[in-house]
Amino acid sequence: MLSTILTKSFSKDTALLILRVITGTVLIHHGYEKLANIENFADAFVKPLHLPFPIFLSYIAAFSEIGGSWLLIIGLATRFGALAIVGTISVAIYHALVTSGFNIYLLELLLLYFASATSIALTGPGNFSLDEVIIRILKSEEVEENVSSTKIKSTSRDSEIKEENKGGLFQFLQANILSDTSS
């Protein structure tokens, strides 16, 4: 048990889980605040950048923060969610630099969000995510297709494969995710 906890893979995956969930959780309220008064946000943050369609772009910013945060939290399409956040935060950093110059008090939170989302986009979600579960299920189906395409001569081997397939999703998750310490 201790060796499982101390392995590099478990530590890395746990760190990515913590980074994803906390980043998504603390960022999501920014998107909801934008939606609460979208015109005010457009006037204060989009119009000073002289971007076209400020209301539309404000909705894009709000939904990318909300949607990207939820994708980070649950670990589904994680890199896409992280890239949506990186895009929105990049514009926010640009806005802070244009309107206030290099003011570290305005930039520090934005830079932390940017670093977190960029790290997640570059490294992926880790093993404790829905992305990883989907990938493992697809890989196991691919292996099953390869096995079934080759003719198995022994009927006893055929019955063993059927017994393995009856294990269910919980046994699959336990065998492939919860006990994985190889990488």
Image (cartoon, grey):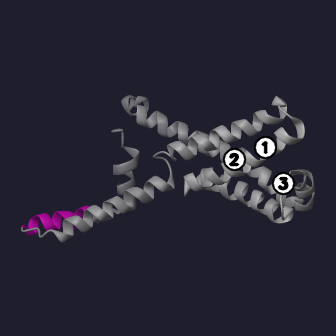
Residue drawn at point x = 60 percent, y = 44 percent? 20
User: Is 28 rendered above or below residue 9?
Assistant: below
Amino acid at the residue labelled 3:
Glu
Using the numbered discs, state the Cα–Cα distance from disc 3 to disc 1 in whole angstroms: 20 Å
Question: In this picture, is 180 found above or below 70?
Answer: above
Residue at position x 49%, y 47% from top?
Answer: 128
Q: Dividing the picture into quarters, in which one does residue 183 lie?
A: top left
Magenta part, dominant SS: helix
- Give left or right: position of 79 versus 89: left
Decide: is 95 above or below 12.
Answer: below
> Does the magenta-highlighted stretch encompass residue 163?
yes
Using a 10 Å C-alpha cutoff, classify the residue at mark 1 as few (fewer than 14 neighbours), some (14 to 19) or many (20 or more).
some
Which percent across, then down, holds residue 62? 77, 58
- Looking at the rendered structure, the secondary structure element under dot 2 is helix
Could you say whether the residue bearing mark 1 is in a helix, strand or loop?
helix
Q: Determine whether label 1 and label 2 are within 8 Å by CB.
A: no
Tag nearer the camera, 1 or 2:
1
Q: Position of residue 129 (x, y in %)?
A: 50, 51
Position in image of residue 156 (x %, y %): 10, 65
The range drawn in magenta is 154-164
Report which quarter residue 139 is drawn in.
Answer: bottom left
Question: Which is more toward the observer, 94 or 113?
Answer: 94
Identify the secondary structure beneath mark 3. Answer: helix
Disc number for residue 33: 3
The quadrant of the rendering that contains the N terminus is: top left
Going from N to C along the chain, the mark reached first, 1 or 2, is: 2
Q: Amino acid at mark 1?
A: Tyr
